[in-house]
Image (cartoon, rainbow, N blue to C red):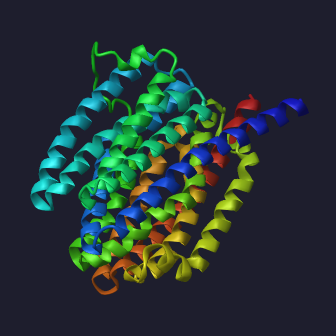
Amino acid sequence: MTSTRQTRRAGVRRQTLFYTVALGLGSLVTGVLFVFAARSMPPGTFGLVSTSIGIATVLAGVIDFGTNSLWVRELSDSHTSVGVVARQMRGKAVVAAATAGALAAVLGTWLTPACAVVGLYLLALVVAQMSVVPLRARVMPARVVSCTVADRSVAASTMLALSWFDVEPALRLPVALSLGSFAGAALAMWRLEGRSEFISCKSVAMPWGGAAFFGLSSLVLAVQNLDQAVVLKVAGASAAADVGAVSRWMSPIGLIGTALANTAGPLAARAPDVRSAWSTMKPTRPYVLLAICVGAVSSLLSPWLVPAVLGTAYAGSIPVFQILAISATITVLSQPVVTILQFRGYDRTVCWVVWSGVMLQFTVLFSVVSTMGAIGCAIASLTCQVFILAALVWATCIKVARESKTSVATAGR
C-alpha cells in the first residue's frame, strides 16, 4: 500500500514537472520574443501590436468558451465518446477561421495594416490549444512538452529569420507566434493515436454543447485581457506599452499554477469527492512554494531588471511589474482550486466567483486608470485576484463540509 501511494505521488510530481517545463519554456520564449519586439519598434507602435495580440487572445477565449477544459473532463472519465469531441473540435476550427478573417479586416482598418496579421494568430492559437486536449485527457504530459518545444522553436526561428530579412517590425511578432502555434498543433496531431478521428472532414458539430458554466468562467477570464485595451483608450499608447511590455513576464510566475491545474483536472474528474481530489495534489506543494519565491524575488529585482531588459524608455513599467508579480503569485494559489471545483461538478460556483472578481477588477480599473495610468491597471488586477482566492477558499470549505455530511449520513443508513 505504501509503495503504491509513493508511486502515485511520484507520478503526480512528474506530471506537474512536465507541465511546468512545457509552460515555462513557452512563457520564457514568448517573453523573449515580446522583449525583442519591444526593442525593435517605438513604444507607441509596440503598444498597438501588443494590444492587438491581447484582443486576439480574448477572442480565442470567447471561441473556446470553456470547451477545452470540458473536453478534458469528459474524455478523462469516458463520459463522452472521442467521435463526439472530434466533431465539436472541427466545428470550433470553422468558427475560429471565420472570426480570424473578421478580426484581420477590423484591425487592418482601425489600427494599422500590419495589425491585420493578428487575425492569423487568432486561428493558430485556437487550433494549438485544442490540439493538445486529447493528450491532456490521456495524461501524456511528455508529449505536451514536445508540442510546446516545437511551437516555441518555430516561433523563435521565424522571429530571427524575419529580423534577418528586415521585415517590417510590426509584422514579426504576430507572424512568428502564428507559425509556431501551427507547428505545435501539427505535432500534437501527429503524436496522437487515433488521430484520423480528429482530422477527418466527415462532419462538424456545434462545439459549445454542455459548456455553459465552463464557458462563462473562461469568457470572463478572457475579458480580463481587455484591461490593456482600456488603458490604451483612456491613458494612451505609452501607458498601454508600460503594461504590455511586462505583462507577459507574469507568465513564468503563473505557469506553475497552470501546471498544477493541468495536473489536477484529470485527477479531480476521477476522484470520488473534493477532499480526495485535494489529497492527490499534496505532492505538488513544493511547486507552490517555488512560485511564491519567484514572485517575491521578481518584484524585488524589478528596479534593476526592467531597465536592463527593456531600456530606460520603459521605466514606467517598474511599479507595474512589481504589483503584477504579486497578483500573479496569488493566481498560482487560485488556479488549482478553480480546476478541482470545476472538474468535481461545481462549475456554477466557480463561474459566480470569477465573474464577481473580474467585475470588481474593471470597476477599480475605470475608477483609477485616468489618474494612475498603467499602475492603476496593475492595482485593479491585484484586487481581483485577492477577492477570487478568498471566495474560492470559502466555497471549497463549504463543499467539503457538505460532502462530509452526506458521506456520514449515507454510512449511517
Q: Is residue 238 visible?
A: yes
Does residue 147 appear to the left or right of 102 in the view shown? right
- Residue 267, by quadrant, is top right
Q: Position of residue 198 (x, y in %)?
A: 39, 20
In the rendered image, the vertical position of residue 338 relative to residue 184, given as above or below: below
Of residues 124 and 258, the one drawn nearer to the viewer in this rendering: 124
Q: Residue furthest left?
A: 109
Q: Is residue 403 left or right of residue 143?
A: right
Note whether 188 is above or below 297 in the view shown.
above
Write down the quadrant of residue 227 in the picture: bottom left
User: Residue 330, image x and y in percent?
Assistant: 57, 64
The C terminus - image quarter: top right
Q: Residue furthest right?
A: 2
- Return the residue nearer the eye: 392 or 112: 112
Q: Nearer the viewer, residue 135 or 275?
A: 135
Residue 238 in the image, given as x and y percentages of width and height: 28, 78
Q: Residue at x 28, y 48 (%)?
A: 59
Q: Quadrant of the N terminus?
A: top right
Q: Would residue 372 appear left or right of 21 to someone viewing this image?
A: left
Residue 58 visible (yes or no): no
Relative placement, left or right, of 341 versus 354 is right
Which residue corresponds to the image point at 49% horizontal and 64% vertical from the top-left?
249
* 25 to 112, vertically: above or below: above
**Identity of the residue drawn at 60% across and 68% down:** 295
